[in-house]
Amino acid sequence: MIRKIFYLLFALLGVLAVRPASARVDHLEHLRVSSAAHAATARLELAGFTRAHYFRLQHPDREVIDLLGTRAGARLRLPRPNGWLRDVRMGIRPNGALRLVFTTASAAHMRLVWLRPSRAGRVLLFELRGFGPESSAHAAPPRAIRTRLAPRDDGRDIIVTVDPGHGGIDSGTIGPHGTMEKTITLDIGRLLARRIDRQRGMRATLTRDSDVYLTLRDRMRVARRDHANLFVSIHVNDCNDPHIKGAQVYILSLHGASSEAARILAARENASDDLAGVQLRGKSHTLATVLLNLSQTTTIAHSVVAAHDVLRALDRSVPVNKMTVQQAAFVVLKSPTIPSMLVETDFMSDPTEALKLRQPWYQRRIADAIFRGILAYFRDHPPAGTLFAEERAARLRTLVARNAH
């Protein structure tokens, strides 16, 4: 009898020894929701690095997210429904997932966007956009805010679209003392737009002039709608090393260009207005590919030159992290027809630089440097029909006449 009990205890200990450790549980710390007439965005701030599944239910229309291995944080409060977003509910599934259910007034497009990880965890944006003419994927983007117009001349103005990164529920990087990237980028973006508007022959538009959320492709659409000659996106960097500082300038990578070309070509019959001056509707796949590749090659070449000019101007005024133009597949840089760059003004993770970024004098120094780089680029590469092109032609005529004598 004693021997049987011994064997049973031994077997039980064996089972306990090989029993897997309990899975790590992450926490949803905050949930913030912004709702418009036919759209909504939920910002989920997670303490860990969970996985998410999402799907749609009908009758009524509900958009559902399951956060695997996640629990509600102690301070989590569900937001109140507003307008098109009818209800927000939460519950625990039998498999341990935390389920969030968003009830909407109509069926919606859904998209999950993971923002850049930070030391505190990750941020997940859950974008909802209702079907219908008021809010379809091809609906007009939010109205661009125009700053004061520059003086008009016989030649048309050069248009620069300034894009202050993040906004609304997307705060971007959060630095010491709660400094938010979205605030810094808006301050610098406004200063840059005003500086551009003071230049004869140039005019700025802003993708946002207040604390509002825009999708990345909405920002691109603002630049296309305003016939921009250059797109400049303003951001603040972040990393795990608090001693790294300095500005960086990015343009689109070749990989990003090829993936965007594939997307456009796949939808070319329904996206003829996406490309200013490059009509792909009705073209064969081969011809459309050639036209798009030519446009992208020219645009990237101009982006490289403009980014170099801005980087050199920054180097004369503020610390620069790398004196070479970087390349990445940032979505906002993917316009095939508008030269585009993304300026990381500094690193928020450096406490000293984060403090400087909050100061108006330093923000003005950054904005002035970016402007000088833009001005240098357009003086050497003015778009046809602009005042800058007329002035450059006049300078060349004067130079030729002087050499002739």
Image: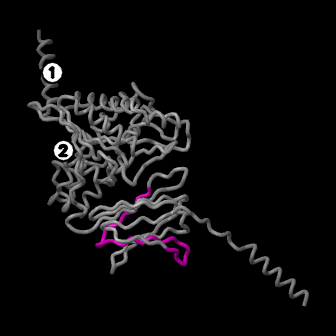
Crowding near the residue tagged with mark 2, few <14, some 14–19, many ≥20 C-alpha atoms within 10 Å: some
Residue 252: horizontal and vertical position, in percent? 34, 45
Estimate the spatial distance between the alpha carbons at disc 1 and disc 2, rounded to whole Å.
27 Å
Q: Is residue 373 left or right of residue 385?
A: right
Part of the protein shown in magenta: 91-114
Q: Is residue 218 left or right of residue 96?
A: left
Residue type pointed to by label 1: Leu
Give yes or no for contact between labels 1 and 2 (Cβ–Cβ under 8 Å): no
Q: Is residue 310 left or right of residue 155?
A: right
Is residue 214 shown above or below 310? below
x 22%, y 42%: residue: 146
Residue placed under numbered mark 2 in the picture: 227
> Observer-nearest residue: 301 or 54?
54
Residue 223: horizontal and vertical position, in percent? 24, 46
| Residue 396, label in figure | 1
Is residue 65 shown above or below 366? below
Magenta span contains residue 1:
no
* Quarter location, residue 57: bottom left
x 29%, y 50%: residue: 219
Which one is closest to the eye, mark 1 or mark 2? 2
